[in-house]
Image (spheres, rainbow, N blue to C red):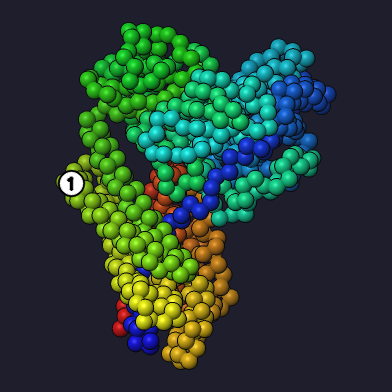
Amino acid sequence: MKSWLRRAMAVLGIVAGFAGRGLSQTLEAEVKTPYLWRVVLDAAEHPALGAGVRQQIERDVLAALQPALGPLGTVEVVDMSQTPREKWDPLWQQYEDKGFAGLEAARELTGIKTHFLRIDYQEGMYFLRARQHDGFTGLVSPLRQQRVPAAEWLGRAAGLLLEQDFGLCGTIEKVEEGAGTVTVLVRGGQLGGWERWVKAGDVFAVAQVFQSERPAPPPLRTATGKLIAPTSPQPLSLTASPRAYTCLRVNQIGRDGRLTCTVLSAYRTPLPTGRALGYRCLKLGTREGPLTIRLISSEGSGPRLGGQITVRAHESGFQTPPAPRDTFLFQDGLFRSQRPYAHLACVVISVGPGTGSQFPVPILTDEVVTLPFETDPKRVEAAAVLQAVVALANRVADARNAQTICFQAVSELIKNEKNAEALVRAQAGYRNARLAAQSIAEELERWREQLDKSAEARRLVAAIEQHLAALNKANDELGKHIKTLEAVVAQENDPKALARDVQAQALAARITILLGRGDVEEALTAYDQLLSLVPNDAELRSRRDKLRQEWQPKSPEHAKARDYLLKTWPGVATVVDFRDSLPPLGTAVEECMKHGDHYTLRKLLHHFNTAVVKLNELHDALDPNREQDRKDIEQIRKIGEHLAALEKRIQDYVARFSEAEKR
């Protein structure tokens, strides 16, 4: 038995690759969880807004909203000025620092609806503004404004202003790419009272929800400590990104909080699957009204040939044959509708014949809606090239993600002594990765001669080539594991083979996979199991002891560096998180390299693919027509370049150890 064991152990080497995570968790719909609707009153310092007026507003708003919400949840009204700053929620601080725009920043999902109500007194009138951050979806409502002539009307007016944007929430039950309709499970749909908040034709905004590495949120409590839900319904920490230019329109309202909705989107794949746990949605306070559109190019200016652009819209869909009044009029650089639209307009923009670009636009306020559109032929070509290269980058990231999931699945099947299933899974993963690599490489070649049209596309190609090389290298390693598994399964089917020998050979194969991924703790456990089968194998025991000794931290700084790389850094979730993490990330990598800790760095490589996916999702949620978003887009580009360079350095470092092990 020692001969095959030595051969199996000799292939202990790196399985180079990134780690994505399989979606082992499901997204909780919270159909029995009540809402906590927190109204935060922010009144200006003015004699007309004294303590008595503010207290009356609190009572009136609560009296207006709690009966409307009924059994669906709890409403609380909190005066921001009367709450000690140390008890402020982080969202309150963002609001104070940046105003209503601060609500748009990504943050952990808390499950709480936080509705800010700002009241000013100007020229003898009260000026109300309100906007909500929904802690179930991470989405925000539009900014609402209203003038009120007298203090005694403030509470009632504020209640009506807030109520229109309560925003029923839901979770898409099952996401299938390309599906035209979906089923939405209403949050609190089994509590009763939700029906009054939704009707056919209503519009929901959509957000992708992701798991983060941070602790799960605490149970829902009011500001005074009253418990709303006894436990956190979602036993993990979540973040979310808005799915831009994608909406759901309610077609049918069913029982037990189920809605059937049409998916309307600017994208060919409105609801892509991947690293996201799923999708949640928030009902928008839409209305009937006219629509005015401003088109903006990637430069931030209005497109050329404005008078030659056709903009049309219809409520029922993008393919509806247009009537004359569906076409917008071009005046003063803006496109204005000739008629009102109810709840949502399916806008189609084109230059000359063709299908053009399509955007679902909810009808929310009278403000001008800005949409991206290119008319400069060179920019259109550059955008097409970049779009194709971005799609390739996403494909290679998905392929590496699937490859890592394959390694995880094979390892678990071996652990559960399902060696034949492990072999089938490995063979399928090997075949899929090889076909994906070939297809991506071929398509990349087709676009090479057009890369001079887009500098950004050229930068992306370098990263794609790096990822493609890693995909192929990992697949070569998987091929070696397949040969080992074939021998294990053949011996398993041999009636003369001892069960102990088969189990030992399978454990050796699992150790190979685990060490290639940097999972030393699990590999040591597998070593112990293997030694229980062959307790007299001194060479095997020596390997185990050497690995255990090598895995011990060499200093307190080394232990902290490993902890940061494997526990803290994978939890980064926002652009600011990524930016601020770069210095400590580099320092921790240097510390591990100083001590020859290639196993930690192997495992770290698993988290780079997840980081790339996170950055892509953050990028997709940004609007290049907004100045702040353009700054974030540039920041994401720089972060991506930094991580790609660091990843390449780590790969080269780990490869040296792999070559040494082979020798």
434 horizontally vs 193: left or right? left
Q: Amino acid at mark 1?
A: Arg
Direction from residue 250 to residue 451 in the image, left or right: left
Quadrant in the picture for the N terminus = bottom left
Labels in figure, total: 1
The residue drawn where x is 32% and y is 49% is 395
Classify 160 as above or below 496: above
Q: On the image, numbered disc 1 is attached to which residue?
A: 446
Q: Position of residue 587 (x, y in %)?
A: 48, 67
Q: Residue at x 29, y 40 (%)?
A: 387
For residue 565, above or below residue 122: below
Q: Residue at x 43, y 61 (%)?
A: 409
Seen as rendered, the residue at the extreme left is 449
Q: Is residue 17 visible?
A: no
Question: Is residue 157 shown to the viewer in this render?
Answer: yes
Q: Quadrant of the C terminus?
A: bottom left
- The residue located at (51%, 53%) in the rendering is 24
| Element assignment for label 1 | helix
Residue 602 position by quadrant: bottom left
> Mark 1 packing: few (<14 Cα in 10 Å), some, or many (20+)?
few
Please provide percent x and percent y for residue 579: 48, 53
Q: Position of residue 569 (x, y in %)?
A: 51, 59
Nearest the viewer among 492 and 121 is 492
The image quarter in which residue 177 lies: top left
Question: Is 618 placed left or right of 235 in the picture?
Answer: left
Task: Looking at the picture, tell me which residue is in the foreground, 643 or 472.
Answer: 472
Q: Nearer the viewer, residue 343 or 142?
A: 343
Please state which of residues 397 and 378 is positioned toward the viewer in this rendering. Answer: 397
Q: Is residue 32 above or below residue 559?
A: above
Which residue in the rendered view is the most extreme toward the right?
52
Residue 159's spot in the image, x, y percent?
70, 21
